[in-house]
Amino acid sequence: MNQERLMQVLLAPQISEKATFIADKYQQIIFRVVPDATKPEIKSAVELLFKVTVDSVKIANVKGKKKRFGRMMGHRKGWKKAYVCLTAGQEINFVDGGAV
């Protein structure tokens, strides 16, 4: 795979209460990814950027919420997120900026 493409696949880690719960219970990390990303691309990108080994990747498409702007109805853009499961004994520490 193209190294430039892999550097652009991951957009940001999803930091929330639910993401922290999933990280503690299932040893998974949630990332926002580009809408056309595939599972092998996400796996390679995480392994390249954080120097860890990935066990599995699950993908979910999040639909944008419908919002009202005065009398007009609109909606937010949808996005794609990836649940990345690391092998046992490995973790990513975002405070230090990389793998532990």
Image (cartoon, rainbow, N blue to C red):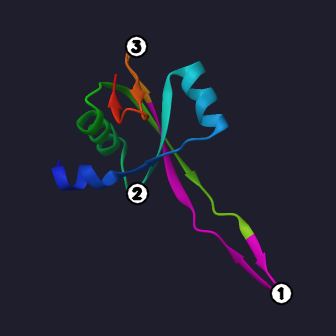
Task: State the count of labels.
Answer: 3
**How far apart in space, not on screen, are marks 1 and 3 (Cα)?**
52 Å
Q: Are the residues at dot 3 and dot 2 in contact (C-beta closer than 8 Å)?
A: no
Question: Which residues are the magenta region?
Answer: 67-84
Q: Are the residues at dot 1 and dot 3 in contact (C-beta closer than 8 Å)?
A: no
Q: Residue at x 63, y 27 (%)?
A: 21
In the rendered structure, does residue 94 fall within the stretch colored magenta? no
Q: Which residue is mark 2?
A: 34
**How far apart in space, not on screen, are marks 3 and 2 (Cα)?**
27 Å
Q: Which residue is mark 3?
A: 88
Q: Which residue is mark 1?
A: 71
**How far apart in space, not on screen, are marks 2 and 1 (Cα)?**
32 Å
Quadrant (top left, top right, bottom left, bottom right) of the C terminus: top left
Q: Residue at x 44, y 49 (%)?
A: 12
| For marks 3 and 2 on the same chain, the one whose residue lies earlier in the sequence | 2
Q: Position of residue 15 (x, y in %)?
A: 56, 41
Q: From the viewer's side, name the closer residue of 75 and 39.
A: 75
Q: Position of residue 40 (x, y in %)?
A: 30, 40
In the rendered structure, does residue 78 fall within the stretch colored magenta? yes
Relative to 53, does residue 81 appear above or below in the rendering?
Answer: below
Q: Find numbered disc 2 in the image and state the secondary structure of the residue it sits on.
A: loop
Q: What amino acid is found at the position of numbered circle 2 in the picture? A: Val
Q: Residue at x 19, y 55 (%)?
A: 4
- Quarter assignment of residue 53: top left
* Neighbours of disc 3 within 10 Å: few (<14), some (14-19), many (20+): few
Relative to 1, does residue 36 appear above or below in the rendering?
Answer: below
Report the disc number at residue 27: none
